[in-house]
Amino acid sequence: MRARWILVLLLLLAGCSSGPAENDGRITLRFQSLAWQQESVQVNKELVKEWNATHPDIKVEYVQGSWDSVHDQLLTSFEGGEAPDIIHDASDDLADFAYGGYLADLTDLLPARLKSDIPQRSWETATFGDGIYGVPFLQEPRVIVANATWLKESGVRIPTPERPWSWPEFRRITKELSGVGKYGVAWPLKDPVSATLNLSLSTGGQLFHRGADGKVTVRFEAGDEVMPRTVHDQVTSDRSASPTTLGSGGSDTLPGFFGGKYAMVPLGFSYRQQIVQQAPEGFDWQVLPAPAGADGLTQGVSPQTLSIAEDSPHRREAARFLDFLLRPENMVRLALGDWMLPTGTEALRDPALRTPEHDWATGTALAPHLRSAPAQSVRGYPEWKDKVATPAFQEYYSGAIGLGELRERLEDDGNLVLARYQR
């Protein structure tokens, strides 16, 4: 009888175990990072090493992930009970995971210091319902990278964050900069949806509208038309935008940019690293703010985020690591490694991010204008984007369909997709 009770007690104790630990009693946390640039990977690994050196009881294991497959990989790992404790992702990929119960609500796990350092507008990008399911820590405004020599010789007004171009002025200037075999702008719109939605915030575009019942519908209204109509007209009417780059990624446009084929290329702020590495000797370039609309320089962003798996047995220890990783001085290191902007207000004040070199100061000046991307909390957005919006925008930008058909497909076909996620 006594042996039986001892066995029962051992089984109960085993069932109460908080999760896997090292033989010596240390906790091990798996941190899946999506850093891919050499500088960024190095910084992340250095910070993990520094944590491990000062926290012998909580070991962090660095796991390399990939942006190309992260959504499907995470879904598989969640459903298989093998998700990493700490998850690097982007805020526009979190909605289904948050609503699906795969991510821990960080509201009561994060320290007050971290909560107060990141502005509310950034927290909104990772807030779903009443919970916070990721810490937004790096953000990237869309900017215009310009051939500085070309612009100077043309005599056009050079925009600044204080005096940006309007969308009509931008269209007019791209016409002035165009000529035989040369284009004022090259739009790399391999992924046309996020660029269109995020830049349309400057003209009051929202596209997604939440009703009193909480359900989201698509309405393509006047504010949503300005940016896509500008691109469409530059390509099809003005011949001031290259039609061949519409299906290209940002990196694909750089050879033509360096070769003098395009005066300007709208890109994410982090592309400056590639330009510094690849530009021919003597090539003079500069960063300009994206055009402004009725709402000024406002644009949507989907920051990189750090989340904690709901199934992690060590959520509080994982939150301690996040607090360490995102100290202001560490956030600066992460931002410099990725050539992006930190979300933290103290980190943004660092002189290293406000230097004229490589136009860091231009990007930092745009930080107050960054808002949650329109699609952040929309369930079913990935399917809507892939099956409806991407082909519709691609056809519109190329001139294959008109504005009316674009609106019809985004609204009619799009709302059928979204409805399936809101029953």
Image: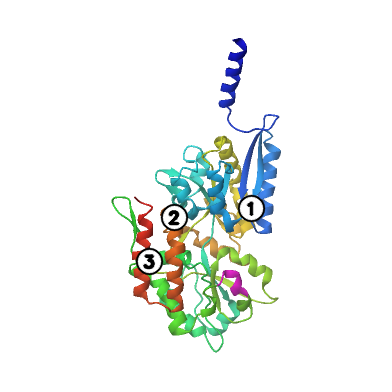
Q: Are marks 3 and 2 in contact (CB under 8 Å)?
A: no
The residue sitting at 55% across, 48% down in the picture is 76
Residue for badge 3: 410
Q: Is residue 354 above or below residue 30?
A: below
The residue sitting at 42% across, 47% down in the picture is 128
Q: Earlier in the sequence, mark 3 or mark 2?
A: 2
Q: Give the percent coordinates (x, y) of residue 344.
A: 53, 50
- Near mark 1 (Cα within 10 A), the count class, few <14, some 14-19 or many ≥20, is many
Q: Camera-side residue: 101 or 59?
A: 101
Amino acid under disc 2: Gln
Q: Is residue 279 above or below residue 343?
A: below
Q: Give the percent coordinates (x, y) of residue 93.
A: 49, 54
Q: Earlier in the sequence, mark 1 or mark 3?
A: 1
Q: Which mark is residue 376?
A: 2
The answer to which quarter of the image holds residue 261 is bottom right
Amino acid under disc 1: Arg
Q: Is residue 158 left or right of residue 331?
A: left
Residue for badge 1: 333
The residue sitting at 69% across, 58% down in the picture is 38
- Nearer the viewer's eye, disc 3 or disc 2? 3
Q: Is residue 249 located in the magenta-colored stretch of the structure?
A: yes
> Can the viewer see residue 84?
yes
The answer to which quarter of the image holds residue 52 is top right
Q: Is residue 338 above or below residue 232?
A: above
Q: Give the percent coordinates (x, y) of residue 35.
A: 63, 55
Mark 1 and mark 2: Cα distance apart in space: 26 Å
Residue range of the region highlighted in magenta in the rendering: 248-254
